[in-house]
Amino acid sequence: MNMNTALQELGAHENLLSDKEKTELDENGFTLFHDMISKDELQEFRERFEFLIEKEGKHAGCELGKKNLQPSRLLANVCNKGEIYDKVYTNPRLLAAIHYVLKDDFHISSLNSRDAAPGKGHQAFHQDGKPAKAIGDYNVCNSIWLLDDFTLENGCTRLVPGSHNFFKTPKSAMDDPKEKHPDEIYLVAPAGTVCVFNSHLWHGGTINTTENPRRALHCYFTSRTEKQQTNQMEHMRLTTWKRLSPAARYILGVDTE
């Protein structure tokens, strides 16, 4: 198994992306896929999130380590926590976009689910990984699967368009990355939307000022030479491995046979 074969078997190819989406990824560092999650799937994802949060209790998110836990409801390693999540990291359109950004061989780094709970969720601007060294020299790409509407009031993500090509971190360029950036925009979109973004892009969550949940899935990929945030071989459950195709296993970065 190799990257090209895996993408071909999963139906992922560049023609799934429009010219507009490619331009947005190149210039702005992100694009939106609308209506990627059906109403039935949204309900299933939400119910699964609440079930796992209750089941795992204080241990929810422990796979990331205590130092990585956010002041929010967090689930980690959901690749191993339900068949419904298989359709996230093997989605052909998502994989086409990830491959368009990263170009080279890649694997999933982590699949987590997060809820910016009421009164929580604000983050400093940050990048996933180190700054890119040149245009096109990218090794991290992320996606946010909106399980609830993202609004200005409920903790939506903020982004700085074009910052994937700033070649510097927010911390080195801003007096306080927790504050507003003059060019920041907000990811306001309905549930069912997927935002794919070059995660050298400056981004961060905002505070949820409502009494409602703001749940999302974060499906994060890196070049295959980069260490995974969640070591999939270490956490892989046999029941998960058995149900997956060799192509899906390759995307996860686990033994295909």
Image (cartoon, rainbow, N blue to C red):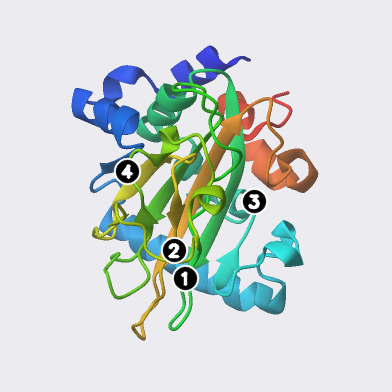
Labels 4 and 3 touching (C-beta < 8 A):
no
Locate residue 51 relative to residue 8 in the image: left or right. right
Q: Earlier in the sequence, mark 2 or mark 3?
A: 3
Percent of width and height locating residue 93 = 35, 32
Q: Nearer the viewer, residue 187 or 135?
A: 135
The numbered mark, 4 or 1, whose residue comes first in the sequence reads 1
Identity of the amino acid at label 3? Answer: Asn
Picture quadrant where residue 3 is located: top right
Considering the image in quadrants, where does the N terminus appear?
Answer: top right
Helix, strand or loop for disc 4: loop
Residue at point 24% right, 48% down?
Answer: 35
Q: Which mark is residue 122?
A: 1
SS state under label 3: helix
- What's the CA distance linking mark 3 and mark 1? 28 Å
Instruction: Check contact, mark 4 vs mark 1: CB within 8 A.
Output: no
Identified at 50% across, 65% down, the residue is 123
| Above or below, 225 relative to 252 | above
- Identify residue type, mark 4: Pro
Q: CA distance from mark 4 to mark 3?
A: 33 Å
Q: Earlier in the sequence, mark 3 or mark 1?
A: 3
Residue hosting label 3: 80
Amino acid type at mark 2: Gly
Mark count: 4
Distance Cα–Cα, label 2 vs label 1: 5 Å
User: For the residue marked with disc 1, what is the amino acid?
Assistant: His
Horizontally, is 171 left or right of 227 in the view?
A: left
Residue for badge 4? 161
Residue furthest out toward the front: 175
Q: Which residue is mark 2?
A: 205
Q: Please, is residue 164 above or below residue 3 in the view?
A: below
Please report whichever mark, 2 or 4, sits nearer to the chain's N-terminal start.
4
